[in-house]
Image (cartoon, grey):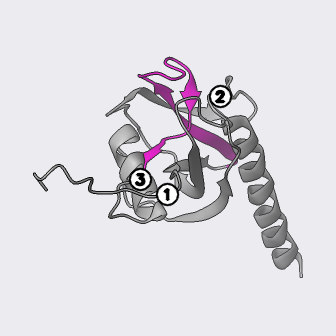
Amino acid sequence: MDNGEKRYCYRYPHPAVTADCIIFGMDGDTVRILLIKRGAEPFKGKWAFPGGFMNIDETAEECALRELKEETGLENVEIEQLHTYTAVKRDPRERVITVACTGIVKLTEVKGGDDASLAQWFPINEIPELAFDHQEILQDALARLKERTDRILQYRQS
């Protein structure tokens, strides 16, 4: 459209949408969380979940898996939606809604890429300070993991 016409023009502002991945790594009885060190502002140098902005032509799950691969090298991970986070000031850049997804994988080597300067597994009891509202998201993901684990244990005992 070269005629100066605006491509998108709406009466109401639109929030940006992101997807974040909370990936649990299992190795026997050891449970770890995958984090990336942010290579860009905001929160440059802080730890966060792999994730990023959704493209206009992808689903939240497609975005989550793309960002996971770009930032950590992990592929072929089965994920499910955990929750949608909508706090008005959760991102200092603009109004951002995120869809958090969880997955469980065997511990494997990861490598920071794209806008992640580093990717690393952390024991769940040694999580560093997290960017954005990722501490809240982590608590919800851990609660979901515990619910699932408790159900599995109950099933095995019956």
Q: Amino acid at mark 3?
A: Met
Mark 1 vs 2: CB contact within 8 A? no
Q: Residue furthest left?
A: 2
Residue to which mark 3 is pinned: 54
Disc 2 crowd rating (10 Å Cα; few below 14, some 14-19, many 20+) is some
Is residue 23 shown to the viewer in this render?
A: no
Question: Dot 3, crowdedness within 10 Å: few (<14), some or many (≥20)?
Answer: many
Instruction: Tell me where residue 119 sits by quadrant.
Output: top left
Is 43 contained in the magenta span? Answer: yes
Where's the C terminus, which quadrant? bottom right
Q: Position of residue 79 (x, y in %)?
A: 53, 63
Chain-order first, disc 3 or disc 2 = 3
Taking the spot 57% from the left edge, 26% from the top edge, the residue there is: 47
Return the x and y of residue 30 as percentages of the image width and height.
67, 43
- 107 w.r.t. 79: above or below: above
The residue that appears at 87% across and 73% down in the rendered structure is 154
Q: Label 1 crowding class (10 Å Cα cut-off): few <14, some 14-19, many 20+?
A: few
Going 36% across and 30% down the picture, which residue do you hit? Answer: 115
Percent from the top left, x then y, of residue 71?
38, 38
Please tell me the numbered disc located at residue 158.
Answer: none
The quarter of the picture where residue 57 lies is bottom left
Q: Nearer the viewer, residue 9 or 147?
A: 9
Whole-angstrom CA distance, mark 3 to mark 2, is 21 Å
Tell me the distance, in whole angstroms, between the alpha carbons under discs 3 and 1. Answer: 22 Å
Element on which disc 1 rests:
loop
Indicate which disc, 3 or 1, sits on the residue closer to the N terminus: 1
**Residue at numbered disc 1:** 11
Q: Which residues are magenta?
A: 29-53
* Circle 2 residue: 130
Mark 3 or mark 1: which is in front? 1
